[in-house]
Image (tube, coloured by chain):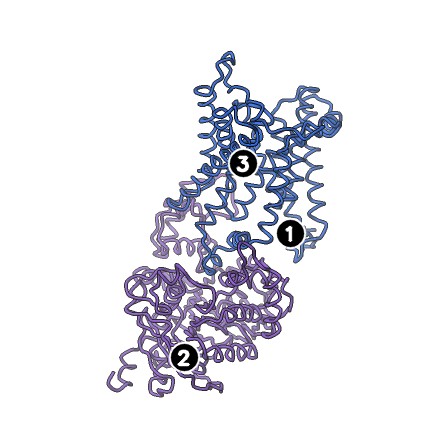
Amino acid sequence: MSHDHPLIRLEGLTKKFGPLYANRDITLDIRAGRIKSLLGENGAGKSTLMGMLAGRLRPDGGRILIEGRPRHFSSARDAISEGIGMVYQHFMLVDAMTVAENIFLGHPGGILLQQDAMERQVEALARQVRLEIDPRARIADLSMGEKQRVEILKLLFRRNRVLIFDEPTAVLTPQESKQLFEALREMARQDKAIVFISHKLDEVLDLSDEIAVLRKGEVVADMTADRVQTKEALARLMVGREVILQVDREPVETRQTVLRVRGLNDAPLKDVNLTVRQGEILGLVGVAGNGQKPLVETICGLRAPGTGHVRLMGQNWSRFFRKRRWDGNLSYVPEDRQGLATCRNLSLTENFLLTTRQGFSRGPWLQRPAAEKRLRELIQTFDIHPPDPLSQARQLSGGNLQKMVLAREFFRRPRLIVAEQPTQGLDIAATEDVWGVLLKARSRAGILLVTGDLAEALSLSDRLAVMFDGRIVDTFDADDRAKIDAIGLMMAGVTETARSAIPDA
Amino acid sequence: MLNLTAYKRQEPHPWSSCLVFLAAVLLSLAVSAILLKLQGKPALQGIELLFRGALGSRWSIEDCLIKAIPIFLCSLGVAIAFRLQIWNIGAEGQFALGAIGATWAALTFPDQPAYLLLPLMAVMAFVAGGLWGLVPALLKLRMRANEIIVTLMLNYIAILLLDYLVYGRWKDPGSFGFPMTKTFSATAIVPKITGTEINWGLGLCLICGMVMWVFFRFTRKGFELKVAGENLNATRYAGLPYEKLVCFVMITSGALAGWAGFIEASATINRLQPSIMVGYGYTAIVVAWLARLNPLTIGIASFLLAALRVGIENLQLELQVPAAFGGIMEGMILLTVLAGSYFNEFGFRLRRRS
């Protein structure tokens, strides 16, 4: 093995989805015996990049070199045979089988299983990398952390040289995370190459030998860990400081309070307070996974609140959702357009009826022709392609599907809109369309804009709330320069610094 | 070396589902012929007897239709539950309860005129079958019990209940000890369509099939069921009452199977006896899958599997083939059609591998 070449080199790797670059001209080296972190926001392109390395996605440009030789992966199998393995966030284990059986599953070898030998081998392997586990335990009885160990052992057992971890600590307790990090270091000592994908700054700083930062599909920094000056600098690299796009944001008078959250405690949420009035956009910013999801699910009725008060349109939560009206009420534009907001195998008309069906009913009958007629008009207004109410949701691109969801939700004339990452994965033109629609909706609705894109939050919001670790760290007006400058820090959980930047906090 | 690789089709081939179905049926017939041969019976003649027995005369076609009636009703019920991805394997038990409910009315009010008694029997069958279907729905929702297992076990309980009644309290004193009720009074028997042997259950089938078609196409509830069967997350997102929908489909499903039991007891056997349970409830599951839960195709598939039953009876008489042979063929057709659906979604290409 020659040491002039890194184990893996990604050279000018590019991947497009439609007109959008998910990855653009990415060059990275992955070396044996080192832990490389890939840091980036949700949607920065981390998963796409690793998908190409794991053989699941085919690059549109650039190449992958392994020990200096270019390789083409046409399937995940090719990547596995090169010794590249990935631990996904969703484990791929058979619940009813034991640890040892899972590790041997799909392993070429004799037809007969030798239970004892299998278990002994697994035990030895586990000890070698300090991932203690009982090879006889059934997967169904294991904690998330233990399941993850089984996934890791699976890869080690297949003699993988490169192990990729996709947000591995998302499912772990702090104690389990610590054990995982020790194991990762041990594996690096044994000359494995480790790729660690995360958006958590502390972990990355704690663990890595090298850090690459991805933003909007491009590598904005690639350095050894000792060259990182401060955590804040890293946060800034990740979040970016783009020029705020100029949007016409005429002030609208705020009126009635449409959402009031008081002292909501419901792990991981801690004492959350929020108010949204008609006529304003409240931008809720923060690194993903700091409690935004449970908060939004609670507000939108998908999750019952713990202790504390949630009032919508002046009614308490349970009353509101027991007798919800379809119009003049709450509209939720979720991040998950395909799985939650639409049904992929149903037609656009049927997807339109998903939340507006009560408006198109007479007695037991559903007035599909009327719905289809309205939808045709909306398709025109929102410029949705293909402009055919009979096409299925899965035939639409992400941007068009999002416009479809927006068209439907605005048709309900909501007074409260919860928009979650509304422009994620959309191109510039579509983004501007969506922004325009949201700003216009302000005239009659209050909007809670949940976004990981700081530029978007700053361009649209009248007020901003920053979320970290299940709390709303701070809420302030969008023209408060001092606090806006501190957003990056608040998002990274550097509260002390943030506080000191604020007089009388 | 040449290597065959499968790839996923973007659009299913327009004719493929028809072709696959035909190929699957032919394949099962071929395997059946081989099985006949292995038993030392003439294979080709056996297949011919099968067809002639089922479709060879007016009498046999009428028999096919009569048997298709309970299969169709059960299958319609099963299909409505399957649409919501609720796996109701309990049509057999719900059928038994329907027969019991109808029989209770027939034995309790034998002297009422037909225009009162028959509707009452129908209502009782509907209620008994529907409640029997509601039990697994409630257990699923309240205690997270798997409906496949619960419905399956309830089948055995229902059959034992039926046995208990016909061996015990409902046994006809004049039956020389045979486990059966008294023959129903003439007003408790669903009449035949004039000039045929077929009973008016066929009309009930037509109405139920049409109602189901209209229901899924034109009503709000039908639409909500379709969504809830498609995507559970979107169901919660849209605020659909999932629990109510589960109860609704299980009651409807059980009630339709109950009606099948009512027709069978009233029109075909004219009494209640253990031999009423011939597995229509299980055949219905096969039919619902073959027909992809579509009411019209359920009609066709019900007729075909009823024809298979009639044809096998003929084979039994002429060639002394065991009765289980019918079950084997039924299972084989289902397996080959299900396996064949792979070819609807995937195509093949040859690839040279070095």
Q: Chain of mark 1?
A: B
Q: In the image shown, does A280 or A245 lie closer to the viewer?
A: A280
Residue linked to disc 2: A280
Measured from the top left, where is residue B57 in percent x and y? 75, 27
Mark 1 = which residue? B345
Amino acid carrying label 3: it is Ala
Q: Chain of mark 3?
A: B
Q: How many numbered marks are there? A: 3
Label 2: element kind = loop
Q: Give whichever of A416, A392 is nearer the camera.
A: A416
Quarter of the picture holding the C terminus of chain A: bottom left
Q: Is label 1 in a helix, a strand or a loop?
A: helix
- Residue B62, how many percent across, how many down? 69, 29
Chain containing mark 2: A
Percent coordinates x, y for residue A293 in the rendering? 39, 66
Q: Which numbered circle lies on residue B93?
A: none
Name the residue at 75% across, 25% down.
Answer: B45
User: What amino acid type should be assigned to the residue bearing mark 2?
Assistant: Glu
Q: Nearer the viewer, mark 2 or mark 1?
A: 2
Q: Nearer the viewer, residue A434 or B276?
A: B276
Image disc number at residue B257: 3
Which residue of the protein is positioned furthest toward the top in this rendering?
B176
Q: Residue at x 51, y 11 (%)?
A: B176
Classify mark 3: helix, strand or loop: helix
Q: Are marks 2 and 3 in contact (CB under 8 Å)?
A: no
Q: Is residue B122 above or below residue A20?
A: above
State the CA–CA distance, disc 3 to disc 1.
Answer: 33 Å
Q: Colour of chain B?
A: blue
In front: label 3 or label 1: 3
Q: Quadrant of residue A200?
A: bottom left
- Name the image quarter holding residue A290: bottom left
